[in-house]
Image (spheres, rainbow, N blue to C red):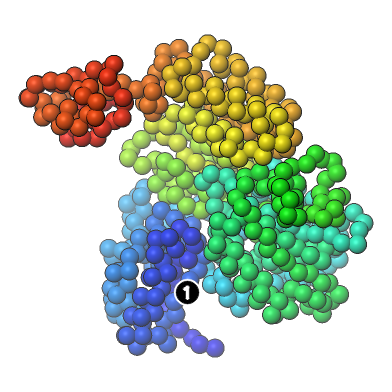
Amino acid sequence: MDLYRAHVLVCGGTGCSSSGSAQLIERFEEQLREKGLEKEVKVIRTGCFGLCEAGPVVIVYPEGTFYSRVKVEDVDEIVSEHLLKGRKVQHLVYVDHKTHESSVQKSLKEIGFYKQQQRVALRNCGVIDPENIDEYIAFDGYRALAKALTEMTPDQVIKEILDSGLRGRGGAGFPTGKKWQFAAASKAEHKYFVCNADEGDPGAFMDRSLLEGDPHAIVEAMAIGGYAIGADEGWVYVRAEYPIAVQRLQHAIDQAHEYGLLGKNIFGTDFNFDIHIRLGAGAFVCGEETALMASIEGMRGEPRPKPPFPAVKGLFESPTNINNVETLGNVAQIILNGAEWFRSIGTERSTGTKVFALGGKINNTGLVEIPMGTPLRTIIEDIGGGIPNGKKFKAVQTGGPSGGCIPASLLDIPVEYDTLTSVGAMMGSGGMIVLDEDNCMVDIARFFLDFTVDESCGKCTPCRIGTRRMLEILERIVNGKGEEGDIEKLENLAENIKATALCGLGQTAPNPVLSTIKFFRDEYEAHIREKRCPAHHCQALLNYVITDKCKGCTACARACPVGAISGNVKEQHKVDIQKCIKCGTCMTKCKFGAIIKD
């Protein structure tokens, strides 16, 4: 076994990979060979560290020095100064957005972004090489599977998951143990255990990051689940747009076969289990479990009426259990550490942790995992580092197209299933988009409904036609053509769609509209009655005004494509509102901040 005095961990998640982390690894290896350090220092490609805003990220152990936004040209300095001479490269060390403190003297857990987090599902992401099964095993990998197969009956495994209180992390929050219990009770020659990795919410990348950073955790959990319900075959349905996740997952499956952890007679028992991957084409509706199964079977991805439920008649008409990636990421830890350990995290009805993809108007964009019940304020201000550019927090959108917007007045609510539902939002799979004062809430509702309309499978009339009618009303409103009664029409359509759509995606599609009307009705009314966008966002409702800061430099007049600006040199100019096409070019060109949106 090779022993190294230092390890250089380089983020190999999609975000950092797109910023050139593969080139960083190549350069590190070249420089280490040049300096004769290749036998002393090991470079490891890991999964996502979470702090995507600071990528590409490099962490040097044993010191735990956190380098951010590392470029290829920085590698030589890190090798020559830090790895050769033991001097940290101060100007590359991560600096906290909120405190402006350098992390040079801190451990990872002391950095503001990580301090309030508790990693269970993400425990190995950014810690191990996801393509090395030996590293996974060194971190207790496959011990839970061994325990389940050799020390527990299927019923005992299910009871442990039931007692833990684990609820589905894919959206609805249904108790995972009950799902397994229903599938186990069905009698059939063949059963299937399916992992739903069809992550389609805008801004969500939790499942992708977990597959990229810790694929063996999903393989192990699926084998445990297969044993519990009596299945001998598993399927992972993952979108083809996740090439790194797919490659690492397939590699993990192959390695597990090689080690005898998949296939026949696992751990010397009579349990047989295998896993296949099915690539999806990116249809949002295939995140719905019955549409997902139809797609695996090679048919058009459309939902079907329930009952029968998948636990009775699912994939290839056999009993089937379906869980999403993050849900499965908790399973091995529950079996290893026990249900009571898991219940000790979170709240009574929302146990454990939840992973969120934190994005939008926030300083620390990235992947976070917090105990259930953590106040929203802690996520936004402490972990997220607050809102950039001194702007005011306005709302946070959770749950993607099926979720809702939570206003600033509710910033102290605990993040848990029932609390979010009670305010018109939902946990969803874990997208969390932060909005500031410049975001128009009517346009946010329009954005999500536009997504739903585009992604509707069209099978049922309420979703196919109803959401389109709602979108048409919203588009009229943001274009300055809203009418009295439009809000009531939206509410009426929304309630009808929620009551009559075929699947959960259609039933929840109106949520972003209903929640924005509930908390931001005044913005809708301003758009309709005053033809004004309070956030100064909707182009059709904007007027550009030249203030007395104008120096008469004529830059705006020369840049205007339609000649809507007039005035003499060194005199205040004016905008002809009738001619103005509201392109914003004048505001961009003005060097004196003399042009404002009205």
From the viewer's perspective, tell me whether residue 135 is left or right of residue 579.
Answer: right
Q: Residue shown at 45%/23% (left/top)?
A: 478
Judge by depth and name the residue closer to the eye, 288 or 178: 288
Report the amino acid beneath label 1.
Answer: Ile
Q: Is residue 457 above or below residue 486?
A: below
Q: Return the x and y of residue 57 as percentages of the image width and height.
A: 41, 63
Report the front residue among 399 and 494: 494
Identified at 48% across, 20% down, the residue is 477
Nearest to the observer: residue 418 or residue 346: 418
Pinpoint residue 27: horizontal percent, then vertical percent. 36, 75
Rendered image quadrant of residue 70:
bottom left
Q: Is residue 63 left or right of residue 162?
A: left
The location of residue 428, given as percent across then percent down, is 62, 43
Is the C terminus in the top left, top right, bottom left or bottom right quadrant?
A: top left
Q: Is residue 445 above or below residue 45?
A: above
In the displayed orientation, state which residue is furthest to the left.
Answer: 570
Residue 79 seen in the figure: yes
- Give the image quarter of residue 425: top right
Residue 427 coordinates in the image, percent (x, y)? 62, 41
At x 62%, y 66%, the residue is 249
Side of 264 relative to 439 (left or right):
right
Residue located beneath label 1 in the image: 44
